[in-house]
Image: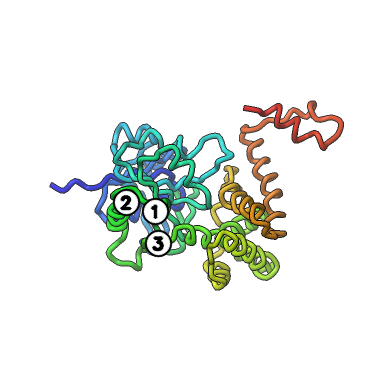
Amino acid sequence: MTVLPKVLVVGSGGVGTISALSLCLNNRSDVTLVVRSDYDKIINLGYTINSCTYGKLEGWRPHHVAKSVAHAAETFGPFDYILLTTKNIPDGPTTCEDIIAPAVTPQSAIILLQNGVGIEDPMIERFPQNVVLSGVSLIGSTNYNGVVNHKRIDSVFIGDFRKEPLPGTDKVIDTFIEIYQNKDRSLNQIDRADDVNLTRWTKLVYNSVINTITTLVDLDVARCQINGANDTLFKPAMKEIIAIAKSEGIMVPEETIDKMIHIGDGFFYPPSMCVDRRKNQLLELEIILGNPLKVARKNNVDTPILSTLYPLLKMTQFKIKEQIGQVTIDENDYTGNSDDYPKIFAEKNAK
């Protein structure tokens, strides 16, 4: 009897749910999906999925559903692959390393199917003996209360973060591609990324610009475009991202701008960050925009649009943090000179 590789998918949003679906339909692995807030609903009713490639599915569930990573590890582990599709929010209450720690064993390969740059270092530092892979997903998929709308083919690029791979890394990558890729490539597409940094910066051309701007104005992409955003904001800001990448020796092709501008033509959909704002959930601000701007400052790259978006989104993030109780403000503490407000806040909220 063949023993199938065990895959733990951590993160049940639009990306994670479709990843779990792709894996299950390929029937070459045993899949566990961690579902936290919607656990009871999914156990009882399953997902409703409206997919551009898989059609409409009612009451769908993966092989196993766990209410936490610890529950998954105790009940369905150990896992050969941990596919992390959660939001990466280093300024939030819990790090990604802490989230997956209960499930990590010496045999576990960790795949960061997440946005942004600069996300691998904390994971490699925490789990130095585990293979840690970069996964970049190009997909239009959202999950609202167990209803998943999937509007673009699931396209994934996977590669190794390390310049000097750990022994066996190539086999780990090849096996994951085999268990993820459906027989019909019109259903999903997973390919090896020889240059993961180029792949990540290429996706930032979209995420650092369209994700952030749609979030600030709370409009889907098409409605922004109706109001002229392509020429006034999207394209100029995308040029700034390409310039930052170039300052690091990463040459993102200029034609990427047109590709990202038109990648969602015809679909009136909000990107993931805009969805998070509407759900009053924390934003992936630092890894999508904060980290690229650190590189820009280090390399003296001019970023007038991105540098304006960032502080505005910091205030948006702050508003969400206050609403969900992550930070508190006692207005009686704030009298006198407003230049002192940051120091007062830092002292009152010091961990």
Among numbered discs 3 and 2, the one appearing first in the sequence? 2
Q: Residue tagged by mark 2?
A: 169
Q: Residues within 10 Å of mark 1 (few under 14, many from 20)?
A: many
Label 1, secondary structure: give it: strand
Give the Cα separation between the discs numbered 2 and 1. Answer: 8 Å
Residue 347 position (above or below residue 81): above
Task: Name the residue: 61% across, 60% down.
Answer: 244
Label 3, secondary structure: give it: loop
Among numbered discs 2 and 1, the one appearing first in the sequence? 1
Q: Residues within 10 Å of mark 2 (few under 14, many from 20)?
A: some
Q: Residue tagged by mark 1?
A: 160
Q: Residues within 10 Å of mark 3 (few under 14, many from 20)?
A: few
Colour scheme: rainbow
User: Would you say residue 53 is visible in this rendering?
Assistant: yes
Q: Position of residue 57 (x, y in %)?
A: 36, 55
Q: Position of residue 45 (x, y in %)?
A: 38, 44
Q: How many marks?
A: 3
Residue 36 position (above or below residue 348): below
Residue 322, located in which quarter of the rendered image? top right
The residue type indicated by label 1 comes to Asp
Q: Residue tagged by mark 3?
A: 194
The residue type indicated by label 2 comes to Thr
Q: Position of residue 233 (x, y in %)?
A: 68, 64
Q: Are marks 2 and 1 in contact (CB under 8 Å)?
A: yes
Give the Cα separation between the discs numbered 3 and 2. Answer: 13 Å
The residue type indicated by label 3 comes to Asp
Relative side of 156 to 278, left or right: left
Give the Cα separation between the discs numbered 3 and 1. Answer: 8 Å
Quadrant containing the C terminus in the rendered view: top right
